Image (tube, rainbow, N blue to C red):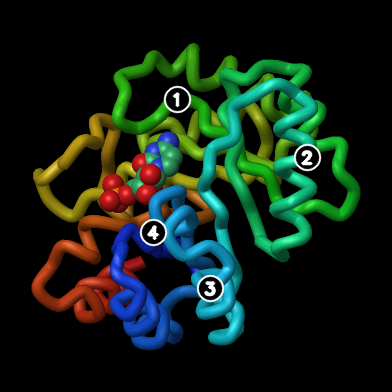
Amino acid sequence: MKKIILALDVYDFSRVEELVKKTVPYIDIYKVGPILFLRYGEKIMRIIKDNGKEIFLDLKFHDIPTTVKLSVESAKELGVFSLTVHSIGGEDMLMAATSIKSRPKIWAVTVLTSQVATKEEVIRRAKLAKACGVDGVISSPLEIAIIKKECGKEFDVVTPGIRLESIYDDQKRVATPDVAIKEGADFIVVGRPILNTINPIETLKNIYNKI
Ligand code: C5P
């Protein structure tokens, strides 16, 4: 699968439609977050699926185990490829999430890339997630190598916090796309560094060609 996950952090329906249509050659998985999902729900899912692509539903579940389990079940019924939970929800919550059969991939957020974190804390949460049957983690590009070393090559590492230059927005633990891929990221999640440029498709094409 293609390595770039495009974060669809735009909130105008026709812009989303246009963006998906124009980025199809470079993207296999589109990330839908709470803002877009709350505004347009299944209509957004349809656009992505009609273009033959996969959905990463990034709602970052963090609740009591039963609620999270039923949320994963509902996401499965929507036909998403992957979804997120917060590792900080703990063992019981993570086990409940992974207990669903033939479910989407579950990726656990270690520590948000907008927060400062020690490597030890990130590794502790990644190992907990792995022990609970989670498929991988969302973590910063600065921790890819150590997570792969501690949790194994098969454990997915998906990294937001991708920056092309020194405009960090609210992200704190960042790297460039090529560094993240070189470090071993399975997927990089990119939003504003593509969407906030004058020609997003050209920017995406450049990143795609570089990695
Ligand atoms: O615009 P930018 O490239 O920073 O977007 C990153 C995307 O990844 C956002 O949609 C954000 O919600 C999401 N994300 C993140 N950090 C995490 C998990 C998800 O930035 N730990």
Report if the beta carbon of the residue with label 1 is closer than 8 angstroms to ligand 1.
yes
**3D distance between C-alphas at marks 3 and 2:** 22 Å
Three-letter amino acid code of the residue under disc 2: Leu
Three-letter amino acid code of the residue under disc 4: Ala
Q: Is residue 180 visible?
A: no
- Direction from residue 135 to residue 56 in the image, left or right: left
* Of the image marks 4 and 3, the number of the one nearer the N terminus: 4
The label shown at residue 43 is 3
**3D distance between C-alphas at marks 1 and 4:** 18 Å
Report if the beta carbon of the residue with label 4 is closer than 8 angstroms to ligand 1.
yes
- Mark 2, Cα crowd under 10 Å, few <14 / some 14-19 / many 20+, is some
Mark 1 or 4: the one toward you: 4
Foreground residue, 101 or 28?
A: 101
The residue where tag 2 is placed is 70
Foreground residue, 3 or 153?
A: 3
- Mark 3, Cα crowd under 10 Å, few <14 / some 14-19 / many 20+, is few
Three-letter amino acid code of the residue under disc 1: Val
Helix, strand or loop at label 1? It is loop
